[in-house]
Amino acid sequence: MIQSEAQAGNQIGIGFYQIFSINSIEASAELYYKKISNIADFKGGAKLVMNEFIEQDIVNVEGKAYGLELLIKRPGEIAFLLGIYLFKDFYKEYQLS
């Protein structure tokens, strides 16, 4: 049986929101950084189907991510919403003692 700590994470973000005129275009942007620890994941190449000992293929992972979220919205009779999400994440495996 695998014993590990509970998954934990911290995130920090900063954002900007602007309405350009009454009933017109709304825009927002957000930058964020996130750090996560104790994520349970499967080893690369693990056989998941019909595996009696699947717990042997579980590893703990820690990671971090950062990104930019952009959103443009126009309300009205013909409304549109455009969102762009750019991000990068990193994960590394570690052994339980």
Image: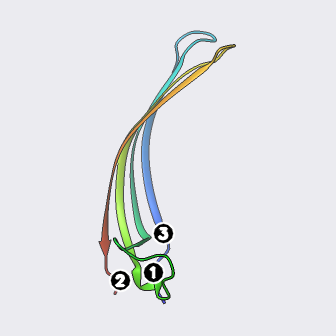
- Earlier in the chain: of badge 2 and badge 3, it is 3
Mark 3 vs mark 1, CA separation in Å: 9 Å
Tell me, for residue 7, which label it has, or none: 3
Q: Residue at x 40, y 67 (%)?
A: 37
Q: Which residue is situated farthest in the right direction here?
A: 77
Looking at the image, residue 42 lies above or below residue 2: above
Q: Give the amino acid type for the residue marked by disc 1 in the picture.
A: Ser
Is the C-beta separation of discs 1 and 2 under 8 Å?
Answer: yes
Q: Which residue is situated farthest in the top direction here?
A: 21
Q: Which quadrant holds the C terminus?
A: bottom left
Looking at the image, residue 42 lies above or below residue 73: below
Q: Position of residue 47 (x, y in %)?
A: 42, 77
Q: Give the amino acid type for the residue marked by disc 3 in the picture.
A: Gln
Circle 1: element type: loop
- The part of the image, by quadrant, that contains residue 63 is bottom left
Mark 1 surroundings: few (<14), some (14-19) or many (≥20) residues within 10 A: few
Circle 3: element type: loop
Circle 2: element type: loop
**Res. 83 visible in picture:** yes
Is the C-beta separation of discs 3 and 1 under 8 Å?
Answer: no
Tell me, for residue 96, which label it has, or none: 2
Q: Give the amino acid type for the residue marked by disc 2 in the picture.
A: Leu
Looking at the image, residue 63 lies above or below residue 82: below
Residue ID for mark 1:
4
